[in-house]
Image (spheres, helix red, strand yellow):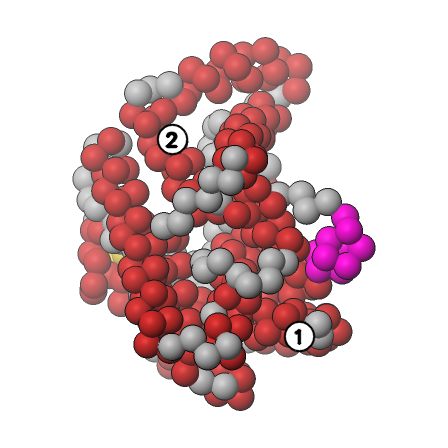
């Protein structure tokens, strides 16, 4: 998010691998033939795909700790940092809105969707950045706990955790109506997986990354590992009464995915920063939002030109399906798409091109 004073290649690599995974699961050749681990859970549950977005938000928090906190400690004016932080967050949100505007225009969508992935990233970045600027670790932990417990209480008190009738979906319906990601015109009910209320526990995910980033810069890898195991255990226990659910971003889901992200960060740090393993994915990581936004726009253009299906059919499905069935060519298309953008970001990185939104 900001250029860091000390660059942890492990963080760049983990961010890059997360973006690569995001492109992989978002861009199969044929949505009718996708291997189950590469699909989101329909409602309750947690597949490998459900780890991708929380990993990215977790890394946003880590980046805040590595970029903003050292500047505070070195005496940089907080007002200046706050202005830069909020302007950066606004640009991320604005980019998300522009991408949805492009999708609405190019794909002839009936309704414009105001919420989305980049919008949520921008909001979480702003809130957690402000907490990093103006609060200490104890307050941040209290905020994290209050968000998780408060969200659980709100959903349990008002409508439970079922589709359409839960409080998060009801707020989406009231605020967005047909502009929600999912909308049933028969019942008039809507739901958005990046909606307003479920952004609260997403902020908790980013806060967990903030605390992990502080441990990372202080060399407390053991703390990261212990917290990761503890989060996994607490998340699994909490899921017995508050199930894993990516659509609702449940508190148990925050802890479960956060535990996975903590352990992944610790592993990358030990292997890459300490043992010198290659930082695979680093080029993706240093141009993460550029790759995400550019690839999304590319998808919209290919679909608008009716090129997506012929590329998949001629380049992959036509000759692979008779030999391997329809699932492998769909995956091969997605892998080729990721490789294409990996090549672009590698080329950009080689030339020192790192556009900042």
Q: Which residue corresponds to the image point at 51% horizontal and 40% vertical from the top-left?
A: 352
Q: Which residue corresponds to the image point at 41% horizontal and 44% vertical from the top-left?
A: 355
Indicate left or right for 290 with 40 as reference. left
Element under disc 1: loop
Name the residue that disc number 2 marks.
298
Q: Specify the principal SS of the magenta part.
A: helix
Estimate the x, y position of residue 316 in percent, counting from the top left. 55, 17
Estimate the x, y position of residue 141 in percent, counting from the top left. 53, 83
Mark 1 is surrounded, within 10 Å at the Cα level, by few (under 14), some (14 to 19) or many (20 or more) other residues, namely: few
The Cα–Cα distance between marks 2 and 1, rounded to whole angstroms, is 40 Å
Q: Where, by quadrant of the figure, is residue 265 drawn?
A: bottom right
Estimate the x, y position of residue 177 in percent, counting from the top left. 20, 56
Name the residue that disc number 1 marks.
218
Q: Is 49 covered by the magenta stretch?
A: no
Query: Which quarter of the rendered picture does the N terminus lie within?
Result: bottom left
What is the magenta range? 267-277
């Amino acid at each position: 998010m900001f250029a860091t004073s000390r660059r942890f290649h492990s963080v760049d690599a983990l961010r890059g691998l997360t973006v690569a995974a995001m492109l992989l699961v978002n861009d199969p050749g044929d949505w009718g033939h996708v291997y189950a681990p590469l699909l989101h859970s329909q409602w309750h549950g947690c597949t490998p795909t459900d780890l991708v977005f929380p990993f990215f938000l977790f890394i946003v928090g880590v980046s805040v700790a590595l970029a903003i906190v050292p500047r505070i400690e070195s005496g940089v004016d907080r007002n200046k940092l706050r202005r830069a932080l909020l302007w950066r967050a606004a640009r991320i949100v604005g980019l998300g809105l522009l991408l949805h505007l492009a999708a609405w225009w190019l794909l002839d969508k009936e309704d414009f969707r105001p919420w989305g992935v980049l919008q949520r990233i921008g909001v979480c970045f702003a809130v957690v950045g402000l907490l990093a600027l103006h609060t200490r670790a104890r307050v941040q932990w209290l905020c994290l706990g209050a968000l998780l417990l408060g969200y659980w209480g709100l959903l349990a008190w008002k409508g439970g955790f079922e589709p359409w009738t839960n409080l998060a979906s009801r707020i989406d319906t009231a605020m967005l109506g047909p502009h929600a990601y999912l909308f049933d015109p028969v019942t008039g009910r809507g739901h958005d997986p990046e909606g307003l209320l479920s952004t609260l526990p997403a902020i908790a995910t980013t806060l967990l990354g903030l605390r992990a980033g502080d441990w990372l810069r202080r060399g407390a890898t053991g703390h990261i590992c212990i917290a990761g195991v503890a989060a996994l255990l607490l998340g699994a226990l909490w899921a017995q009464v508050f199930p894993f659910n990516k659509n609702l971003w449940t508190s148990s889901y925050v802890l479960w995915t956060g535990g996975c992200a903590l352990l992944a960060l610790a592993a990358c740090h030990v292997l890459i920063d300490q043992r010198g393993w290659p930082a695979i994915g680093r080029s993706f990581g240093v141009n993460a939002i550029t790759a995400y936004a550019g690839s999304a726009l590319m998808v919209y253009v290919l679909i608008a030109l009716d090129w997506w299906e012929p590329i998949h059919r001629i380049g992959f499905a036509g000759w692979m399906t008779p030999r391997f069935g329809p699932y492998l060519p769909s995956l091969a298309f997605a892998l080729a798409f990721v490789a294409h953008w990996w090549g672009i970001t590698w080329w950009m990185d080689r030339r020192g091109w790192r556009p900042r939104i």
